[in-house]
Image (cartoon, grey):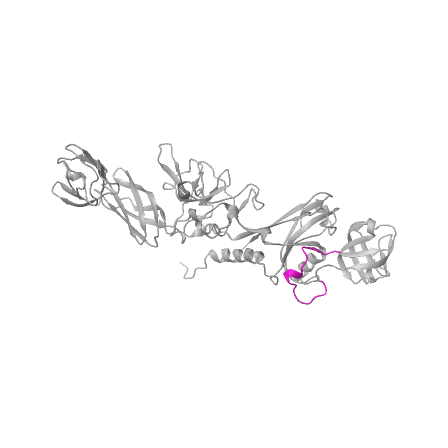
Amino acid sequence: MANTCISAKFSYEKAREFVRELYSTDPEKTVKYIFIGNSIPYQNSDSEIPDIDDTIKDEKSVWDLMFAAKKVTGNDVEMILPRYNWESGTIYKQYDDIVDVTELVTHDVANNYAPMFVMNSVGDVYKCLYNSDNSPSLNEPTGDYTSSDGFISTMDVYGNVNYIWKYMYNVKSTNKFLSDDYMPVPSLYTQLEYSSSEQNLYDGCIASIVVTNHGSGYINSNTSIIAPYESGTFNLTIEDISKANINMFVTGTGIIPSTYITDINSNIITLSLPTSGNGSFGTPIYFNTGVFIEGDGDQVDATAVLDNGSIDRIYVTNIGSGYNFANVSIHGTGTGATARAIISPKFGHGFNPARELMSKDVLITVQYGEVDSTEGGKLSVVTEIRQYGLLSNPHLYGEIIPSKDADCPAIAVQTLNITLLSGQDFSIGEFVYCGLSPETSTFSGIVHAINQDDNIVRLINTRGIPSIGGVLRGTSVTRIISSVDYQDFQPYSGEILYVKNVSPITRFDGQSEIINLEINF
């Protein structure tokens, strides 16, 4: 065993802090962008997507090919989990406060155990609290915190409890962070778009009890009253004392629920509560194995289910609240049975779903072309995207220090835009330069896009500084430079945190592109 534990919550905290920073309204916070780039075909006509390494050279190449960046806001980011849809016949792990949470939320392929959380067909997300000793789930959970306080029981074919689920939150089908592979997860129940409530929370509740030793010799039985009794009686005279034992639960006519035996003397049993009604000679009375939970909380009730004299399982009938510790004792005709209670996380199941289900990933999703295809004339509608990623803390062009969030544009243009005197057009993808030859050029770049009406060429992969009045040359065309607009951000500044090369995404007029970027912490 390791004598050091780095909690999985460490990754959760990093992911949560990442999201929290983007939600911040501090005008001086670190600014982040999702950038798009590389309109130049890969080698072998895009048939093979190249790898990219975490080197300074590759990072500069990313900057050279970048042509736009869109600021990320709090509305563009959310913590996520793998999406597991409920399926009949699947065994779901049940929450257990002594089991490593990473194990509980991981799919155990070898043993065919699914993680302890699922989404149903209407977007409700649940946490498994009880699985009938690793039995398959037979019926889909339904209902929210208004149904049984969010503790949802599903039954087997015999009408017995098969699973107990805890409603956590709901994901609407229109949520932009929902996909076939992952689903969003709130970090607090107060995120109202996820349909949760403080009414869903029960701090220190006990929804399941694990039998650690099944014992033997336990029976549930009944006998008859041989001396009439009236309301308010503590002592009952019964026919067969061998069927009773201290702390067994008692039911029958005029007996208050949760009453148990506190003492036995000859054929007389003493009850923990006085009777609330009368009983006569021959009235049947029933004895059941008693399960008692002692701790610093209250109101937990549980029933033992027997199988050939052993405690098969224990079913919690009232979850209680306020427990930080709890001890379970089992009383009846048998011996050897032991069990332990499983206590909810602090503040209750569903208080912080992201932490409880151990989210350590975030999804950033931004839409290019949200305003119009050109984002107000800043983007070309005739181009391709082969690369995107996450840019942090860039400098505005010509600045030597990182830029404040408040000073940065919502859409950054990373092409160098040159206005030319009238003449023949260059071609998209063409290499252009200033100088007598490409080898001796003082400035060069690749044509990313052309604005024919304005005589503007947009360049990427530029080298050097163009001169106003200079000649821009291509393969067969020469044009005179009349003005230059530089990139919004100083190339090679800030931090490229994430880059992904992809198959070409083709832009057309009238269309928008949604860029999804998943970050694992």
Residue span colored magenta:
397-415
The answer to whether residue 51 of the structure is visible from this angle is no
Q: Residue 458, percent across and down?
A: 77, 54
Residue 356 lies left or right of residue 339; in this view the side is: right
Instruction: Give the position of the N terminus as an image quadrant.
Output: bottom left
Closer to the camera in the image, 310 or 255: 255
Seen in the picture, residue 238 relative to 484 is either above or below; the reply is above
| Residue furthest bottom in the image | 400
Q: Residue furthest left?
A: 266
Quarter holding the C terminus is bottom right
Q: Quadrant of residue 221?
A: top left
The percent position of residue 159, horizontal first and vertical second, equals 35, 33
Residue 284 visible in the picture: yes
Q: Is residue 390 magenta?
A: no
Residue found at x 13% / y 41%: 268
* Residue 118 relative to residue 380: left or right: left
In the image, residue 33 sits, relative to residue 155, either above or below, namely below
Q: Nearer the viewer, residue 516 or 276?
A: 276
